Image: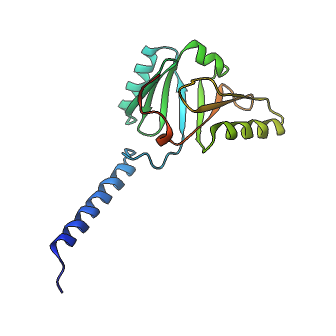
């Protein structure tokens, strides 16, 4: 039985690519934007505190993947999806001084935030939708008393967000 060399080469290359991608996933170093499971966001009180926390996480295997900074928030996005923020006082005030956030990926952030706020209100909690926290980013927050010191945020998939780096 004759098997062309090009077919063997393509099969071997495909296998190696699949193996390296699988290894990256297992090591929590997925180079692709899929899947996007959302994020867990934690706030630090100063740029120095943010740098120290990022360094501490790196010592324990949670390394920084990239930064996505804006005028209002300095962000370190880690390989596991954790985000360490250092927000301005204005941004922090807009989200009710919450120190943490649960980030959810949705198709329509505004609609999803409104639905979440309505759901929380139906269950007896206060909930306010805040959509102007960072005008350059399509992220909508729900500030609620159902969470202590934490807000919900709704955003589009990472491929629909501005390019990482400085967001202005």
Residue shown at 37% from the left, 34% from the top: 63
Residue shown at 39% from the left, 50% from the top: 25
Q: Is residue 6 left or right of residue 58?
A: left
Residue 104: image location, x then y, percent: 59, 40
Q: Is residue 98 left or right of residue 166?
A: right
Q: Quadrant of residue 132?
A: top right
Residue shown at 59% from the left, 18% from the top: 91
* Colouring scheme, one of rainbow, by chain, secondary structure, one colour: rainbow
Quadrant position of the N terminus in the picture? bottom left
Q: Quadrant of residue 41?
A: top right
Residue 162: image location, x then y, percent: 46, 33
Residue shown at 65% from the left, 22% from the top: 95
Q: Is residue 36 left or right of residue 10?
A: right
Answer above or below: position of 141 versus 90: below
Answer above or below: position of 55 versus 1: above
In-front residue for pair 111/9 = 111
């Amino acid at each position: 039985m004759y098997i062309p060399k090009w077919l063997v080469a393509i099969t071997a290359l495909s296998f190696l690519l699949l193996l390296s991608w699988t290894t990256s996933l297992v090591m929590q170093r997925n180079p692709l934007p899929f899947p996007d499971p959302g994020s867990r966001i934690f706030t630090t009180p100063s740029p120095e505190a943010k740098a120290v926390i990022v360094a501490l996480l790196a010592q324990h295997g949670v390394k920084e993947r990239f930064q996505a900074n804006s005028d209002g928030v300095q962000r370190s996005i880690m390989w596991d999806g954790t985000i360490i923020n250092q927000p301005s006082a204005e941004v922090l005030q807009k989200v009710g001084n919450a120190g943490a956030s649960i980030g959810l990926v949705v198709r329509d952030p505004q609609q999803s935030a409104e639905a979440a706020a309505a759901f929380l209100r139906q269950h007896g909690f206060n909930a306010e939708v805040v959509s102007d926290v960072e005008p350059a980013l399509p992220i909508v927050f729900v500030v609620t008393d159902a969470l202590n010191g934490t807000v919900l945020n709704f955003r589009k998939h990472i491929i629909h967000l501005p390019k990482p780096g400085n967001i202005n």
